[in-house]
Amino acid sequence: LTPLVVTFWLAVYHLGTPFRGFGDFWAALTAAHFLFAGFGLSLAVGLVGRALTSAAPRLVPLHAVVAWGFMLALPVLALGIDGRRSVEIVGVLMYGLLLPLHASLGLVVAARFHELSALGRALLALACLSLLVTTAFALGYGLLRHPALDLATMVKIHGTPNALLVVLGTLTAFALRR
């Protein structure tokens, strides 16, 4: 589903026709957001899940719930951005529950998965702790529409840290296997 959502927002950007208040630069950023939220996060969730099988096998069933939850949360959030506020709230709440669970499982992996180098484990822990902070901002934006959390601010305090610290940090952490 991620490619369809990203393609839609890239088409909005390239056609220059705003959709639900998102046009031009913001449409391109929305495409990037769903690319990272759908694809980048899926990679991170998959890597953590594979590591859990040896680091904490009892947590694998919880991870399965988190992984399936993310697959459902993306289309719900995408439909919510289409202007259905109640659906958007459900999507935000799903991510608001699933992201901290994923971060917690990632912290378990950082503590117990000894196939990662010390630097890799530290990067994974940083990625997971960063995710907890950026999720709080996303909840503030998605649920409360707090005036201090406009889109430009969200790019700085949510989007950029998620791309660089969470997704890139997690991928780099697992690239640093012993």
Image: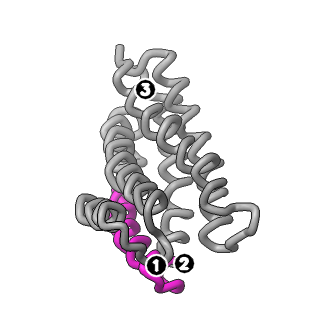
Displayed quadrant of residue 178: top left
| Residue at x 69%, y 73% (from the top left corner) | 144
What residue is disc 1 on?
Answer: 20
Residue 62 in sight from this viewpoint? no
- For label 3, count other residues whose C-alpha is less than 10 Å away and answer few (under 14), some (14-19) or many (20+): many
Q: Is residue 7 magenta?
A: no
Label 3: which secondary element: helix
Residue situated in front as seen by the camera: 157 or 172: 157
**Residue 159 at what x, y percent from top left?**
53, 49
Q: Main secondary structure of the magenta part?
A: helix
Disc 3 versus disc 1: nearer the observer? 1
Q: Is residue 71 magenta?
A: yes
* Mark sitting on residue 33: none
Label 1: which secondary element: loop
Left or right, 133 with respect to 3, comes to right
Residue 111 in sight from this viewpoint? yes
| Residue at x 38%, y 32% (from the top left corner) | 171
- For label 1, count other residues whose C-alpha is less than 10 Å away and answer few (under 14), some (14-19) or many (20+): few
- Mark 3 to mark 1: distance in Å? 38 Å
Disc 2 versus disc 1: nearer the observer? 1
**Residue 22 at what x, y percent from top left?**
47, 70
Q: Which residues are magenta?
A: 64-89
Mark 3 is on which residue type?
Ala
What residue is disc 2 on?
Answer: 89
The answer to whether 53 is drawn above or below residue 83 in the figure is above
The answer to whether 166 is drawn above or below residue 67 in the figure is above
